[in-house]
Every structure is written in structure tokens, then in C-alpha cells.
Amino acid sequence: DGGITQSPKYLFRKEGQNVTLSCEQNLNHDAMYWYRQDPGQGLRLIYYSQIVNDFQKGDIAEGYSVSREKKESFPLTVTSAQKNPTAFYLCASSIGGANVLTFGAGSRLTVL
Amino acid sequence: AQSVTQLGSHVSVSEGALVLLRCNYSSSVPPYLFWYVQYPNQGLQLLLKYTTGATLVKGINGFEAEFKKSETSFHLTKPSAHMSDAAEYFCAVTNYGGSQGNLIFGKGTKLSVKP
């Protein structure tokens, strides 16, 4: 079945460490997105990419980086510059401008 | 600029009772509107969407929503709640031609269903 796979599901990080969250999709979608979810805050857009080798900052890009070397992959790196990284991270994809997102199951990052 | 307001961060209903989750939006252009559902520790799943045409939209699991332009609302309803409906629900807005970078989510409403 087609879908989005996020890994790892749970991740613990020490302060000062960079971590990378994986997002892979086999839906042949052009666009991919990373959202951060905090309790009571809804979803906030970190980065999105509409085509390979191109991506745009979202509302809260500071302290994060991404790459889009392949259509099916959109990894997110949480750097040590992100001051409050503990959160639930959701990856999503869509068929270009169709406006309907398909989400992965999420990755929960906890900073110790 | 577009925005979404979901009234009530928590809603509790009895099993079999009407479910009503409120969503109001702000948009200077005709909106596209969505409701997504999220079960604990999972991603979001599309319930229904409004783009153009019929203002009453039917979705999965017996949910429906009505687009009311005059009230700038897109409330989600279900006639009879089931225990399996307990989840968090998100309203979202964008507009025709807008990139997905313009999809704005509300802060969510957590629905509890009492037996």
C-alpha cells in the first residue's frame, strides 16, 4: 500500500546534538511538508518542498534544515540551534496543488 | 491573510448524542476548507473538504460540514457520537491556486465521548 513512512517513531536527544528525522513516501507525490505539533498549538509549518532540489521555509524554520535530493524522501534535521525541540513532528505529502495532505504517523522527539 | 478559529479546545458528548465542532475562518478570497482527524500518537487523516459547489459536504465516518459564507463558518457535525469518534479534530483553510505552504490549521478540538 502507498503511504508515508516516518522514522524513528520515538527519539531522545541530548542538548546540543543534531538529529535527523526520516520521511519517505511511495505515493509519487510532488510536494512534501514538515509540521511541528505542540499541545494546544495546532500544526505549524516548518519547511515544504514542491519539487526535487527546491524547498521553502515555513513559519518556524529557525533551527531546522531539510534536503530534497529524491522525490520520495524529505528528511528533517533538528539542529542544536533549535531551542525548544521537544515536540511531535509530522511529515506530509500532496499531489502538487490538490490541497489534500497525506500524513505520516509522526515522530516524537524528546530532549533530555 | 487567512486564519482559522476553532471554538472550544475540548468538547465532551455522550455516546449517541449530536457532535458539533465549530470552525470559523477568515479569508479575503474564496476559501478551500478541510477537516482532519487525529487519533492519539498518529498522523492526521482527511475527514472532508469543501472547494466549490455544494455547501453541505459529507465525509467519512458519518461526519458532515456546511460551508456558510455569510457566517464565515465550516462547522463539523455528526448526528450520533460513537466511542470511536474520540480524537482531536483540526479545521484548515487555504485558497484556490495557493501553494500548500498557505494551508493554515486551527489549534484543534479534542472530542471526548462518554459511555
Image: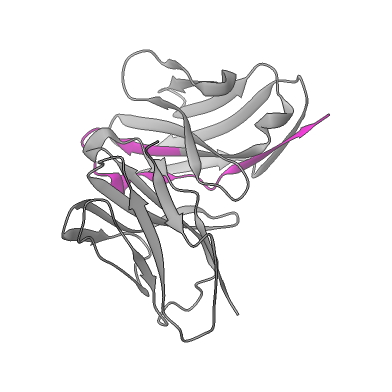
Q: How is the image coloured?
A: one colour
The quadrant in which residue A44 appears is: bottom left
Residue in view at x 30 percent, y 58 percent: A74
Q: Quadrant of residue B93?
A: top left
Residue B106 sits inside the magenta stretch = yes
In the visual, does A4 lie left or right of B76?
left
Q: Residue at x 49, y 42 (%)?
A: B44
Q: Is residue B56 left or right of residue A30?
A: right
Residue A100 vs A31, above or below: the answer is above
| Residue extending furthest toward the bottom | A16
Stretch in magenta: B92-115
Q: Name the quadrant of the C terminus of chain B.
A: top right
Q: Residue at x 50, y 49 (%)?
A: A105
The image position of residue A55, as x and y in percent, is 21, 59
Judge whether residue B27 can be spotted in this image: no
Asked if residue B83 is among those painted magenta in the image, a careful observer would answer no
Residue A93 visible, this orientation: yes
Query: Which of B108 and B7 lies nearest the eye of the viewer?
Result: B108
Q: Position of residue B67 (x, y in %)?
A: 44, 22
Q: Which residue is nearer to you in this view: B33 or A112?
A: A112
Q: Residue A56 at what x, y percent from top left?
A: 23, 59
- B75 vs A57, left or right, is right
Q: How many marks?
A: 0
Q: Nearer the viewer, residue A83 or A20?
A: A20
Residue depicted at x 52% and y 85%: A15
Front residue of this view, candidates B106 and A71:
A71
Reply above or below: B92 against A45: above
User: Based on the displayed image, in which of its 4 quarters is residue B86 positioned?
Assistant: top right
Above or below residue A69? Residue A93 is above
Q: Position of residue A35 (x, y in %)?
A: 42, 56
